[in-house]
Amino acid sequence: MATLLAEHLTLGYRRGASVVRDLVLDVAQGEIVTLVGPNGSGKSTILRALARLLPVQEGVVYLDGKMIHRMSTRKVAQTLAILPQDPTAPDDLTVRDLVTRGRFARQAWWRAVRRQDSDAVEWAIHMTGLETLSERLIQTLSGGERQRAWIALALAQEPRVLLLDEPTTFLDISHQLDIMALLQTLNADNDLSIVMVLHDLNQAARFSHRLVVLHDGEIYASGPPAEVLTDAMLREVFQVEGVVGHDPHTSTPVFTPLQSVRRNGLGHGNGNGNGSGHNGSG
């Protein structure tokens, strides 16, 4: 049985205006699934619906076989955590304060902090490598450090499913790799199911068990990266000509873009990297 299952979801933000149509998606326990697709294809919308942050127009989301909209907020938070694209915290919060908030879903208001709460916070700080930064204010951290703090907050919930919306956005390549390696470790060591949105196709292919390609609000392809990352998919979905090769170090597919094939009046590119087109007329 899938840990997370979406059946025939239709999603949107206004009545009659659907962003995603008739989506069927299942996530097994311990699986890393990455949603990829052009801007506006519905990736973040799906993530919000899976976390019950966006009401569905049609269809049902199941969490551990139960309709998620019938579950209590506390019960959902004990099983599933979501890290949005641009989370914010009060300026006077330390890393430890932030991570401790992840225990709220497992605490009763009338009960003092338990040993297991403290242990969970320490474990989350340790797993994200934040021991030396635990008393620092969130606002003083670098982008990569701040992202690790937010992941620690989610881990403190002790979820079995973690949803992340573009967790590497605005980070330099070193911090991007740190975050992706951390997620891979959490998945392998803790059987954590991960569903995330990524724009970097090579990172998605390297760190995911399965890619789900979205195009115009529907699933264009779903499967192992080596089967999904093809010349035809990149041309039809992303409107990019490129070469798909094989990384000998990671045994994963790797994509080298050559030029855009978009017909939007901005020029078609000429394969030399300057994208100037023939005369600028498009």
Image: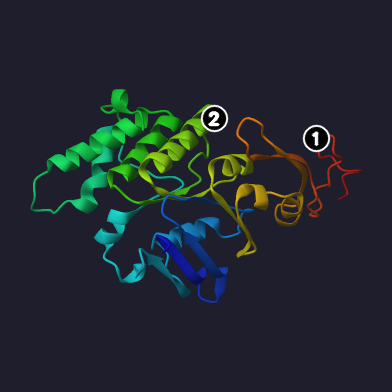
Looking at this rendering, what residue extends furthest in the top direction?
132
Q: Residues within 10 Å of mark 1 (few under 14, many from 20)?
A: few
Q: Residue at x 51, y 69 (%)?
A: 11
In the picture provided, is 240 more to the left or to the right than 247?
A: right
Q: Is residue 51 left or right of residue 41?
A: left
The answer to which of 91 and 255 lies nearer the viewer is 255
Number of numbered discs overlaid on the protein picture = 2
Residue type at numbered disc 1? Gly
Question: Where's residue 219, x and y in %?
Answer: 61, 63
The residue pinned by badge 2 equals 172
Name the residue: 59% across, 45% down: 199
Depth check, front residue: 12 or 179? 179
Amino acid under disc 2: Asp
| Residue 16 in the image, given as x and y percentages of width and height | 55, 76
Tell me the number on the disc at residue 273.
Answer: 1
Question: In what quadrant of the picture does the N terminus appear?
Answer: bottom left
Please report whichever mark, 1 or 2, sits nearer to the chain's N-terminal start.
2
Q: Which mark is residue 55?
A: none
User: In what element is the residue under mark 1?
Assistant: loop
Horizontal and vertical percent for residue 60?
43, 72
Residue farthest to the right, as pictured: 278
